[in-house]
Every structure is written in C-alpha cells, then in structure tokens.
Amino acid sequence: MNIDIIAPGRIKERYLRDAIDEYSKRLSRFCKLSIIEVADEKTPEHATPGTDELIKRKEGERIAKHIKDGAYVIALAIDGQMLGSERFAAKLDDLALHGASHIQFIIGGSLGLAPEILARADWKLSFSPMTFPHQLMRVILLEQVYRAFKINAHEPYHK
C-alpha cells in the first residue's frame, strides 16, 4: 500500500522531525510512505476573513497538484468522522480489501483546508473536536496509521 501525507509547511522543530522519522521507519515494513510538504502562506496578524480564505485557497492549490487520480483521499477536518483506533484500523483494512492501494491523507495549514480540497476528499477524518498544530498533527496521524497496521497484523502495540 502507498500512503502519502500532504501538508503545508516544513517541520522546523527537531523533536517533531525525530518523531516523524521514527514512525516513518516503523511504517516502512507495512507500506510505502511519502510525506509531501507544500509551501505554506504566512497569516498576517489581523487577517480579515477574506484574507484567511485567500490563504486557504493558495495552500489548497498547492495541495491539489499532488493529489493523484485514483488515490483515496482522506482530509483531516474538525467536522470529519471521529473513530477509535480499532475502527480506524478496520477502515484502512476495508479500503485495502476494496482495492485502495494508494491513500493520501491531507492535513491543512493553520487555517484549515480550502473548500475545494474538502470537496475532493473521499472521506473526512477528525481526531478530536480540538484544534491541533498542523505540524504536531503529522506525528499524531503517523502514530495512528502505525497503530492501525499493528492492529490489522494482530501484533502487540495497541492496548
């Protein structure tokens, strides 16, 4: 299975890069993982709602260039479906059983995802009604994808 994570911005914090590297290494035995970083937009201090929408659209255009035809696209969105780890694992297993060999997870920038990206998504996933920093969300997502593969392989990790 091929899994892409598409997200705006570069990870600057060493501890986050280390965690991403660790989960990427762990996932290498289960899937081919690619992390695609697109340029993010700086948000002005007192941005108007119109400016916020323009920023999301610019980031969305950059993200859209990396969405592949035939890939199953999962957008991380606060209004998406919330699942426990077992149900998330079952969802990934079900996708694989039904021929989804390429899954692309989309993480929005600090303002979220453009409406066009949300509309393109095959499914919207939420980890919580809380808002998380988009850089940290990469680590959380990678850990949950790894946990899902471990659950589906009936290997110890999940308790």
Image (tube, rainbow, N blue to C red):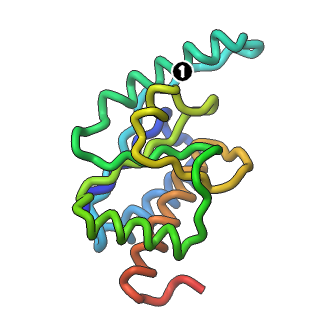
Q: Provide residue 98's location: percent of width, then percent of height.
A: 26, 64
Mark 1 closeness class: few <14, some 14–19, many ≥20 residues within 10 Å: some
At 39% from the left and 30% from the top, the residue drawn is: 63
Element under disc 1: loop
Q: Provide residue 147's location: percent of width, then percent of height.
A: 48, 73
Nearer to me, 34 or 14? 34
Q: Is residue 95 above or below residue 15?
A: below
Q: Provide residue 14's location: percent of width, then percent of height.
A: 55, 50
At 50% from the left and 33% from the top, the residue drawn is: 9
Say whether residue 109 is left or right of residue 20: right
At 60% from the left and 70% from the top, the residue drawn is: 84
Quadrant in which the N terminus appears: bottom left
Nearer to me, 130 or 124? 124
Quadrant in which the C terminus appears: bottom right
The residue that mark 1 highlights is 41
Say whether residue 72 is left or right of residue 13: left
Q: Is residue 80 above or below residue 90?
A: above
Say whether residue 21 is left or right of residue 157: left
In this rendering, the count of numbered labels is: 1
| Picture quadrant where residue 48 is located | top right
At 72% from the left and 50% from the top, the residue drawn is: 129
Which residue is at the far right? 46
| Residue type (three-letter) at the residue carrying disc 1 | Glu
Say whether residue 109 is left or right of residue 25: right
Nearer to me, 96 or 148? 96
